[in-house]
Image: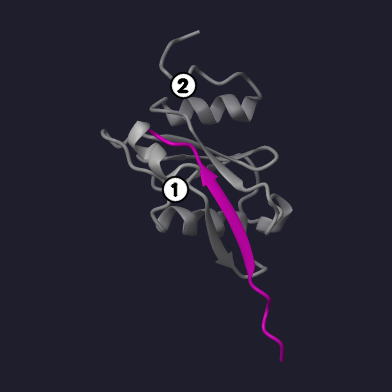
Amino acid sequence: MATAKPLFLSVKRDSVCAGDDVDAPHARRFEFQSSVTLGDALSAVIKAGYLAKIAGGKATWIVEADQPLAVVAEQWDSPEFLVDSSTRLTEYVSLGASKPLFFRYWCQVDPAVVFERLKAGRPLPDMFGRDE
């Protein structure tokens, strides 16, 4: 019986401060089985400590492929998904492709507001806290 061929997911993230730029673009590869779901893959990336921590513990991240997929927040126990998290990862991300899963840092903007705006297709709040 043949074993399943592993799949490799490339990820990148924004820097959170000037000191974090030293390692930019923060590229990393994760290995998964072909049946991994988006939810399980994202959980593994988060549990691996890939995302930078910030003072105050309230970083907001938008997870993107060809579209926004989820919002991750330091103060949340789990991501909030904009798509079906039980769908195979390969439905959203081309594994091994040059375009990675990207974690966009949205500063310390309330993640619930970011999620609701993305879900409604509305413009995001200013990431630096300057209200519209």
Q: Are marks 2 and 1 in contact (CB under 8 Å)?
A: no
Q: Nearer the viewer, mark 2 or mark 1?
A: 2
Q: Is residue 36 visible?
A: no
Residue 86 in picture, x, y percent from top left: 63, 56
User: In the picture provided, is 132 more to the left or to the right than 65?
Assistant: left
Tell me what residue is drawn at x 47 percent, y 46 percent: 26
Q: Is residue 118 magenta?
A: no
In this picture, is 114 found above or below 36? Answer: above
Q: Please state which of residues 102 and 87 is positioned toward the viewer in this rendering.
A: 102
Q: Please state which of residues 62 and 37 is positioned toward the viewer in this rendering.
A: 62
Residue 115 in picture, x, y percent from top left: 53, 31
Location of the N terminus by quadrant is bottom right
Question: From mark 2 to mark 1, how far is it between C-alphas?
Answer: 21 Å
Residue bearing mark 1: 78
Classify mark 1: helix, strand or loop.
Answer: loop
Which amino acid type is marked by label 1?
Answer: Ser
Residue interval drawn in magenta: 1-17
Tell me what residue is drawn at x 70 percent, y 49 percent: 92
Q: Is residue 130 visible?
A: yes
Q: Is residue 6 magenta?
A: yes
Which amino acid type is marked by label 2?
Answer: Met
Residue bearing mark 2: 127
User: In the picture provided, is 71 more to the left or to the right than 89?
Assistant: left
Label 1 neighbour load within 10 Å: few <14, some 14-19, many 20+: some
Residue 107 in picture, x, y percent from top left: 41, 28
In this picture, is 103 found above or below 3? Answer: above
Dot 2 or dot 1, earlier in sequence: 1
In this picture, is 46 found above or below 130? Answer: below
Residue 121 in picture, x, y percent from top left: 66, 24
